[in-house]
Image (cartoon, coloured by chain):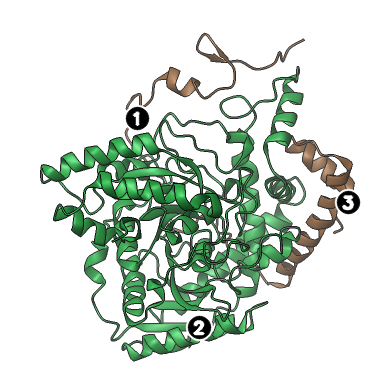
Chain colours: A green, B brown
Amino acid sequence: MKLYELTIHEAHDLLKRKEISSKELTGAVLDRIEAVDSKVGAYITVSRESAIEQAEMADREISEGKMSALTGIPIAVKDLICTQGIRTTCGSRILENFIPPYDATVITRLKKAGAVIVGKLNMDEFAMGSSTENSGIKLTHNPWDLVRIPGGSSGGSAAAVAADMCLGALGSDTGGSIRQPASHCGVVGMKPTYGRVSRFGLVAFASSLDQIGPLTKDVTDCAILAGSISGYDPSDSTSVPKDVPEYTSYLSEGLKGLKVGIPKEYDAAHGLDPEVSLAVKNAVKVMEKLGASCVEISLPHTEYAVPVYYVIAPSEASSNLARYDGVKYGFRDKEKKSLMDMYRSTRSKGFGAEVKRRIIIGTYCLSSGYYDAYYKKASQVRTLIMRDFNKAFDICDVIVSPVAPTPAFKIGEKSDDPLTMYLSDIFTLSANLAGIPGISVPCGFSKGGLPVGLQIMGKHFSEEVLLKAAYNFEQATDFHKRKPEI
Amino acid sequence: MKITREDIIHVANLARLEMDEESIEKFAVQIDEILKYVETLNSVDTEGIVPTSHAIFLTNAFREDIEKQDYDKDSLLSSAPERENGNYVVPKIVG
């Protein structure tokens, strides 16, 4: 038995029966990282020593009979979630040596649950990108085909889970950054409802869209990890004071009576690959066989999600990233003798091209004379996109769609064409604009052997319905059982 | 509206970014293309539509005004590139 191949719930059972220790499990994962990460490039930092200490502590807790579903489980974290004492780079040169003085609330929760933090994962710089090629630190390769991108921005998280270099991971999703890499790497990834998971200690990209969520090997693990990080946090004034259901208890409910909405606009989406379209149609048939009924719905403002997002997200980012000025943390160009020169030089040397591009777009859209034409207009169309979903959810419980229009593309293929890259986010952006939850679950493979994901979206705070639908689909198929050869 | 290299220089200055000639030219073309695409929003009738800045209905999150200290000053200051006597150090501002 290869311990690193275990899911969270399988490892939990073995730990509980004392057939393995967390130290053995953590050691196996750390060895796996050493063996394959030179090819994949998922980790920016491996926290070997503190991971072994945490594993020993977990073993003591287990021997005392104190155990949660995550006690002793090796988890890795996207490198924009603050971890006390462990470098947190955001994939950026400007934070290359930043060691946070505190833990994000999700990390505090994981530690309280007894999880072992094995390291920090690569990402597009400040989460801006769909391929992890915008990382200022390194490249990450898709474990299914190393010449391809793992997706992004949580590309390191998805690749690490797919390559068995952790049992589960945390990512963040501002426009699809959990779901799209999960789809490209053949793992499960969920963006919870906005406000479900605390953003305290998550380095901000676009504050009205960002949400932390899990990436895992199967849906059961997704339910476990989502449950452990969710819930109200007084330190995040946008977190919602609402009880978190016991997600795992909903999984085995069947799909009888579930109404699945199929958006009629999605088939005509720009660049939708016929193989992806077919995999999603087949998935719908499986759900129907399991007792769900399908209904055609309309989301008439779908085509505007990309332009709305690429005004709102850069606008919020341009404001959020103003804090990187070389004063409080991160890189500073110490050669410059005036304050203004120090600001300019620090930011210009610290940020990569995509981050600068979005800061400029955002600053332009918010600048005097253009605010109404861009930011206000986009925020009004955002309202219309939300109304589309509200109307659709009058007649269906969940909406299914592709996650990405194509399987993973090759490294370098789109990196100099930002607009084409943005257009590939068409199926995922709307959920962030509307604040609704979405999950990606493996639903097929292309002829070339690349994974394809199915997206299931639901009403605000209906994560248990998404997890139930995804679980039933997963158990009726075997796509989640395949593993890449590295 | 065509994005010119002057627009890029102006906005880069507002955002405290320096750019070389090559980046200015490249950004002007790319950002013009992106904003042209954004302008497809003009075909949507938004007369009387209330803008959304936040997707979840939340009223103000009030709490009691109780003084507390979550982190000590030194640990927060430890991240600063330059610091002295409990303060951040910046280049000289007043001549």
| Distance in Å between CA atoms under marks 1 and 3 | 49 Å
Residue type, numbered disc 2: Ala
Residue depicted at 84% across the width and 51% down the height: B26
Tell me, yes or no, whether dots 3 and 2 are on the same chain: no
Q: Is residue A352 left or right of residue A385?
A: right
Question: Which circle marks residue B65 in the picture?
Answer: 1
Q: Is residue A185 left or right of residue A406?
A: left
Q: Is residue A272 left or right of residue A474?
A: right
| Distance in Å between CA atoms under marks 3 and 2 | 44 Å
Q: A420 and A193: which one is in front?
A: A420
Please tell me whether residue A426 is drawn above or below residue A106 in the rendered image. Answer: below
Residue type, numbered disc 3: Thr
* Chain ID of residue with mark 2: A
Residue marked by disc 2: A279
Tell me, yes or no, whether dots 1 and 3 are on the same chain: yes
| Distance in Å between CA atoms under marks 2 and 1 | 54 Å
Question: Which circle marks residue B4 in the picture?
Answer: 3
Residue depicted at 71% across the width and 64% down the height: A413
Task: Tell me the SS state at disc 1.
Answer: loop
